[in-house]
Image (cartoon, rainbow, N blue to C red):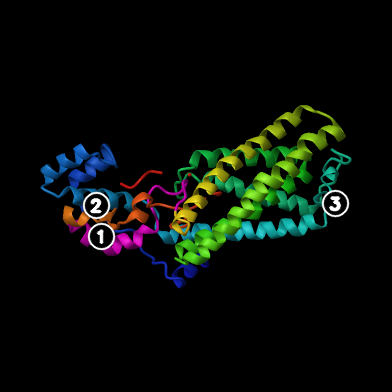
Amino acid sequence: RFIAKPCALHVGIQDSGPYEAQSNAILEKVFISITKYPDEKRLEGLSKQLDWDVRKIQCWFRHRRNQDKPPTLTKFCESMWRFTFYLCIFCYGIRFLWSSPWFWDTRQCWHSYPYQPLTSGLYYYYIMELAFYWSLMFSQFTDIKRKDFLIMFVHHLATIGLITFSYINNMVRVGTLVMCLHDASDFLLEAAKLANYAKYQRLCDTFFVIFSAVFVVTRLGIYPFWILNTTLFESWEMIGPYPSWWLFNGLLLILQVLHVIWSYLIARIAFKALIRGKVSKDDRSDVESSSEEEDVTTSAKSSCGSSSRNGANRVNGHMGGSYWAEDTHGLVRPLATCSSWASPHLRSCD
């Protein structure tokens, strides 16, 4: 309210909601009670009933759907909050772990286990991370709805379970490594989203490339060969198997599965970017493009009132072409999210 919103206004993000659809009781009833995505047969029936052009009805439904979507300003503020937390907690984690022996030798995670002291710095690190992920667990039901809702729900459950379980069992040393590793790429994604919402395309693409590289290296390289290696093999060698060993490593392996899924989505975005020349889509973003809102507002009247002849050259009320015809929602143009990882998740063009 006091920091993110003024920053958004400073970079030119408008403090206004999406264009409101024209009031129509019949279409509103269909939208609420029957479907938000009418098929061709229903569109033709409504066209005859209202004596409206089919294109105008399609336009009405698109504007009505966008009406329920959060504006770009809201998304900018949400991303700025997450960017601030991820950056601060990552810096804190690196500063704390730099002087910790287990950061340089993972076998120290199990030395004298479970009789390891809990320092105040380690305690606060754990409490801040746990509080944040609990807030994400609850806020995901009220925040911007993503297509990867279920994946993120599983991720938050696994993360909270791991943090709580490792704290109870005093596995906090390896727990700090896992948390710091995950925080390494998250703030880069949020930075890319902020640049996208502000329409700094080149900066957005740069952040996304850096994020992709860091994500793949940390989640598919360092995590399995550094973290899983010490929890699966070094712990077994030094302290032997124990009942909670199976649950702890099971949760860590669930995270690894999610890493593979998100890496695949990121790779698909990067592949499309190579073809088109810039990053264009997030397969886990909002169903409707948030970046469209301002364009919809300015072109709504002309596009809704246009005839089918004019509509043939447009895609969802925007100028068509091979670029927009295939994808209209997106991660970095528009980059809605890929995390949490984007997090880290399409319905095709209406």
Residue 300 numbered tag: 1
User: Regarding mark 3 in the picture, which secondary structure is present there?
Assistant: helix
Where residue 316 sits: x, y (%)?
A: 29, 53
Q: CA distance from mark 2 to mark 1?
A: 8 Å
Whichever of labels 1 and 3 marks the residue nearer the N terminus, that label is 3
Q: Which residue bears the numbered disc 3?
A: 101
Q: Which residue bears the numbered disc 2?
A: 59
Where residue 58 sits: x, y (%)?
A: 23, 48
Q: Tell me, yes or no, if residue 127 can be seen here.
A: no
Amino acid type at image mark 3: Pro
User: Regarding mark 1 in the picture, which secondary structure is present there?
Assistant: helix
Amino acid type at image mark 2: Cys
Whether residue 41 is in magenta: the answer is no
Q: Residue furthest bottom?
A: 10
Q: Tell me, yes or no, if residue 233 can be seen here.
A: yes
The residue at 61%/37% (across/down) is: 257
The residue at 22%/40% (across/down) is: 40
Label pair 3/2, CB-CB below 8 angstroms: no
* Vertical position of residue 267 compared to residue 199: above or below: above
The residue at 52%/52% (across/down) is: 270
Where residue 276 sits: x, y (%)?
A: 44, 56
The residue at 30%/46% (across/down) is: 350
Label pair 2/1, CB-CB below 8 angstroms: yes
Quarter of the image where one finds residue 245: top right
Q: Residue furthest right?
A: 112
Q: CA distance from mark 1 to mark 3?
A: 60 Å
